């Protein structure tokens, strides 16, 4: 994994930790969303699903999934102000 991917995993995991998720669930939920690999561990483990998460937590995982599917550099380029200048 490159630096941008690791930094994004770290930041989004910290956001989920601030919403009172345990560390294992927070990290693996973001990791599962970015890599589109299925279930994580903890509350979003193999015998459960993402229904236990709040709406905000699901939106954070949705953002992680978009970043993972659209590739990080293309999403970051769209967010950069220099991309939209002529």
Image: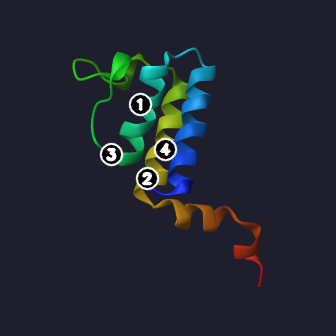
What element does badge 3 sit on?
loop
Residue under label 2:
68
54 w.r.t. 66: above or below:
above
For residue 42, side relative to residue 56 (left or right): left
Q: What is the CA distance from the residue labelled 1 to the residue labelled 2?
A: 13 Å
Contact, CB < 8 Å: mark 3 with mark 4? no
Q: What is the CA distance from the residue labelled 1 to the residue labelled 3?
A: 10 Å
Across and down, in percent, residue 20 comes to 57, 14
Contact, CB < 8 Å: mark 3 with mark 2? yes
Whichever of labels 1 and 3 marks the residue nearer the N terminus, that label is 1
Residue under label 1:
29
Q: In the figure, residue 1 lies in which quadrant?
A: bottom left
Residue at 56%, 38% (x, y): give it: 10
Contact, CB < 8 Å: mark 4 with mark 2? yes
Extreme-left residue of the structure? 47
Residue under label 4:
64
Across and down, in percent, residue 47 comes to 22, 18
Q: What is the CA distance from the residue labelled 3 to the residue labelled 2?
A: 8 Å
Across and down, in percent, residue 43 comes to 37, 16
Whichever of labels 3 and 2 marks the residue nearer the N terminus, that label is 3
Query: In the depicted view, which residue is nearer to us: 1 or 13?
Result: 1
Q: What is the CA distance from the residue labelled 4 to the residue labelled 1?
A: 9 Å
For residue 85, side relative to residue 54 (left or right): right
Q: Which mark is residue 76?
A: none
């Amino acid at each position: 994994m490159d630096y941008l991917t690791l930094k994004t995993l770290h930041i989004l995991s910290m956001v989920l930790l601030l919403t009172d998720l345990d560390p294992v669930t927070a990290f693996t939920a973001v990791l599962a969303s970015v890599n589109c690999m299925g279930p994580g561990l903890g509350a979003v483990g193999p015998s459960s699903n993402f229904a236990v998460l709040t709406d905000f937590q699901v939106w954070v995982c949705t953002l992680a999934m978009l970043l993972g599917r659209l590739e990080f550099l293309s999403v970051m380029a769209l967010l950069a102000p220099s991309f939209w200048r002529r």
